[in-house]
């Protein structure tokens, strides 16, 4: 059934569907499960796929429910890879809180439809015909109409009698203002109409997801596996196996002739992980620091307490050891810093964890009014906590959501030298407004008078040459997202706003237009009016 369509038609298909790019399992550098680990859950998924467990033949959804850091994404990656190897994977969507196109619930169905159409010619023919008759379908609301038009109706044109599996990882990361997951409720309503499709979904046990799963529409359709309730001895053994595999690899690459790691090391690291695979990944990253020996890094971890005085203050008790690790990494990286250095650390980290989307080192440096080399060096010191790309033009990202959660929570980040308070939004909005005030000019892309953007064939090149790309682009598109949390230096912010609106307003609209985000500009003005009303009344 699943045959790739011709490459020549893919661009047309992409334009019709408007999917989120890089959302599939094959994109990114995610790692699956180490061989021999997570066998209990993987066996459960296999049995569900085969319909060999009690009730699984009626379960159109397999919900893997797990706390942050318990390894859900690695399992989803492995499941998707195995489904692909068995030619039963129809599509996948790996949600991400860091990218706007991968945390938008309304982009899931267009993306799944695009991937399904690439694999099945009958599905593709039906989908293209629908989209050509009504190109607005991918943008339509509500979700039920999206799924019916993009998934249900085209799928009825396929001739398959075999199940088609779809993997959705991290559903809780997608924005959803409803008390019950709107995505899950739509699945519950429409999946009975297409019994050939089954969904493997992972998420944290967030309230709206839990409410959606428990809705009457999904009763009897869902098989649930609670990852953090797996026998702790099984999880500890898997984590120990992971530590042994990774640390032996580090020792071989380091040319070590010592017996390292010892059984005592592995036992201690496994205990400290407390069932969190994310702890194990963070620890391995910490041990692979380029300028420090793995044994010295391991000694640093061994000297940190396994239990701390702040145990119980975290929202989840399981976070305690992870917080201790994060604190140890910061203290080891910035030992001996003075107050000015600590301020620079916080300022730079705020641009990593508070910005609306991931930014490159050069953009962070401009945004923070700092030097590139200074920012790069600082981030290198904590590269076990962030994804530091080889290409400096690529964005910097926290390696896991637990890191920004930790560093922005005063109850968890007890070393106040590294705590990122909401006040850093003020610094960010002021810098955005300052950059726009200094850089915006009339017709920066030199577009001929009375021309539509679509008529300018080299618009992308003009954007690159104009200097808009980078910090100015972020400032123009995201300044207002830092305005709402701003509660201090109100006078300074209002003065900067006045300058923008009085002197640079039309230039900002021009840039918004060539970037294709005029809708965001209108939203920015609405947010500004609401913010001004609130702060002025206060």
Image (cartoon, helix red, strand yellow):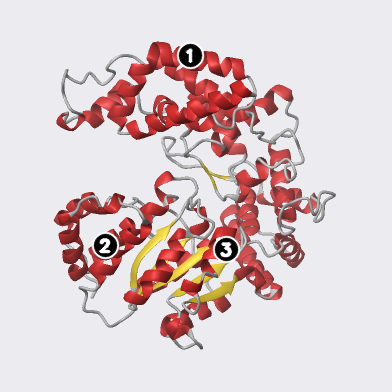
- The residue tagged 2 is 149
Residue placed at 71% from the left, 55% from the top? Answer: 319
Q: Nearer the viewer, mark 3 or mark 1?
A: 1
Q: Relative to residue 294, is residue 235 depicted above or below?
A: below
What is the distance, in whole Å, between disc 3 and disc 2 at their CAs?
34 Å
What is the distance, in whole Å, between disc 1 and disc 2 at their CAs?
46 Å
Task: From the top left corner, tell me how far across and down residue 156 is, in percent.
Answer: 24, 73
Determine contact: label 1, label 2, CB under 8 Å.
no
Q: Is residue 189 left or right of residue 528?
A: left
SS at mark 3 in the image: loop
Marks 1 and 2, the one that precedes in the sequence: 2
Marks 3 and 2, the one that precedes in the sequence: 3
Mark 1, other Cα within 10 Å: few <14 / some 14–19 / many ≥20: some
Q: Is residue 98 left or right of residue 467?
A: right
- The residue tagged 1 is 498
Q: Which mark is residue 71?
A: 3
């Amino acid at each position: 059934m699943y045959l790739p369509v011709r490459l020549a038609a893919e661009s047309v298909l992409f334009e019709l569907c408007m999917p989120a790019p890089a959302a599939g399992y094959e994109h990114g550098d995610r790692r699956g499960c180490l061989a021999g680990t997570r066998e209990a859950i993987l066996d459960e998924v296999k049995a569900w796929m085969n319909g060999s467990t009690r009730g699984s033949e009626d379960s159109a959804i397999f919900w893997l429910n797990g706390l942050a850091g318990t390894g859900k994404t690695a399992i989803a990656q492995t499941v998707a890879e195995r489904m692909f190897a068995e030619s039963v994977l129809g599509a996948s969507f790996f949600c991400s809180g860091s990218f706007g196109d991968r945390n938008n619930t309304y982009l899931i169905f267009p993306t799944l439809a695009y991937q399904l159409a690439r694999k099945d010619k009958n599905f593709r023919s039906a989908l293209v015909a629908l989209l050509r008759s009504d190109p607005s379908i991918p943008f339509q609301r509500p979700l039920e109409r999206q799924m019916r038009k993009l998934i249900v109706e085209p799928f009825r044109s396929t001739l398959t009698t075999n199940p088609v599996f779809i993997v959705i990882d991290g559903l809780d990361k997608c924005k959803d203002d409803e008390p019950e997951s709107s995505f899950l409720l739509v699945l519950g309503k429409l999946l009975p109409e297409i019994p050939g499709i089954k969904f493997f979904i992972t998420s944290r046990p967030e309230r709206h997801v839990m409410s959606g799963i428990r809705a009457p529409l999904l009763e009897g359709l869902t098989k649930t596996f609670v990852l953090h309730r797996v026998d702790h001895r099984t999880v500890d053994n898997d984590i120990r196996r992971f530590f042994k595999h990774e640390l032996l690899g580090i020792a071989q690459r380091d040319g070590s002739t010592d017996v390292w790691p010892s059984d005592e090391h592995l036992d201690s690291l496994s205990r400290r992980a407390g069932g969190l695979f994310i702890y194990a990944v963070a620890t391995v990253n910490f041990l692979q620091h380029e300028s420090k020996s793995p044994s010295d890094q391991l000694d640093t971890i061994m000297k940190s307490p396994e239990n701390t005085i702040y145990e119980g203050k975290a929202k989840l008790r399981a976070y305690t050891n992870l917080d201790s690790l994060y604190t140890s990494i910061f203290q080891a990286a910035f030992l001996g810093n003075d107050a000015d250095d600590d301020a620079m650390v916080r300022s730079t980290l705020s641009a990593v964890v508070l910005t609306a989307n991931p930014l490159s080192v050069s953009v962070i440096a401009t945004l923070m009014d700092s030097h590139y080399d200074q920012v790069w060096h600082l981030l290198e010191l904590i590269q076990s906590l962030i994804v530091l790309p080889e290409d400096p033009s690529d964005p910097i990202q926290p390696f896991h959501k637990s890191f920004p959660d930790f560093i922005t929570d005063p109850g968890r980040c007890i070393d106040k030298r590294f705590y990122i308070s909401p006040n850093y939004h003020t610094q960010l909005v002021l810098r955005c407004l300052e950059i726009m005030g200094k850089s915006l000019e009339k017709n920066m892309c030199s577009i001929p008078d009375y021309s539509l953007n679509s008529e300018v064939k080299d618009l992308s090149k003009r954007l690159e040459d104009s200097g808009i790309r980078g910090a100015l682009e972020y400032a123009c598109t995201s300044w207002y997202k830092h305005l709402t949390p701003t509660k201090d230096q109100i006078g300074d912010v209002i003065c900067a706003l006045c300058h923008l609106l009085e002197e640079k307003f039309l230039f900002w609209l021009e840039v918004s237009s060539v970037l294709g985000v005029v809708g965001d500009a209108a939203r920015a003005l609405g947010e500004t009016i609401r913010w001004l009303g609130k702060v002025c009344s206060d």
